Image (cartoon, grey):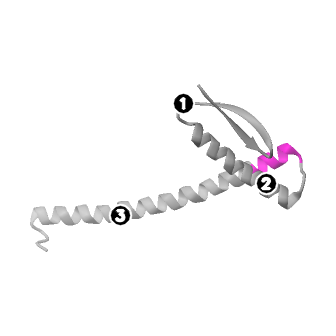
Amino acid sequence: MAQVVVTIDGKAYRMACEEGQESHLEGLADNFDRYVGHLKSQFGEIGDLERDVEALRQNRDGAAVVAEKSDQALAGMLSELTTQVRSIADKLNGTNPG
């Protein structure tokens, strides 16, 4: 099991992760640290638990938006691919000589 040290709100945390996942965990921690910094700039010093819960909520909401955009892009690509496959099938079947 690998370990990384991440910094959130100026505090260092040692965390375990699977081998090869170190950079992913560091990236997640960096994103979380940005949310925490944003909340501190908006609301000042609030309790760690409240701040962390709000940062997690914002992080989740951001991830949901990215996932939705990815789903829409994937649906568009699949639709285009389906159209191309149908066109090829029509040509092979002789129903669309174009």
The earlier-in-sequence mark between 2 and 1 is 1
The Cα atoms of the two marked residues, 1 and 3, are separated by: 37 Å
Magenta-colored segment: predominant secondary structure: helix
Q: Is residue 51 magenta?
A: yes
Q: Secondary structure at mark 2?
A: helix
Image quarter where the C terminus lies is: bottom left
Mark linked to residue 19: 1
The Cα atoms of the two marked residues, 2 and 1, are separated by: 29 Å
Coordinates of residue 45 in the picture (x, y in percent): 90, 52
Indicate the amino acid at tag 1: Glu
Coordinates of residue 89 in the picture (x, y in percent): 17, 61
Can you identify the residue that label 3 sits on? 79
Q: Nearer the viewer, mark 1 or mark 3?
A: 1
Q: Is residue 5 left or right of residue 42?
A: left
Q: Residue at x 73, y 49 (%)?
A: 33
Can you identify the residue that label 2 sits on? 37
Image quarter where the N terminus lies is: top right
Question: Are circles 2 and 1 on residues that touch, CB within 8 Å?
Answer: no
Indicate the amino acid at tag 2: Gly
Marker count (numbered) = 3
Coordinates of residue 42 in the picture (x, y in percent): 84, 61
Q: Secondary structure at mark 3?
A: helix
The earlier-in-sequence mark between 3 and 2 is 2
Q: Which residues are magenta?
A: 47-55
Q: Is residue 37 left or right of residue 19?
A: right
Q: Residue at x 74, y 54 (%)?
A: 35
Coordinates of residue 51 in the picture (x, y in percent): 82, 49
As displayed, is residue 21 above or below residue 96?
Answer: above
Indicate the amino acid at tag 3: Ser
Q: Secondary structure at mark 1?
A: loop
Q: Residues within 10 Å of mark 2 (few under 14, many from 20)?
A: some
The Cα atoms of the two marked residues, 3 and 2, are separated by: 41 Å
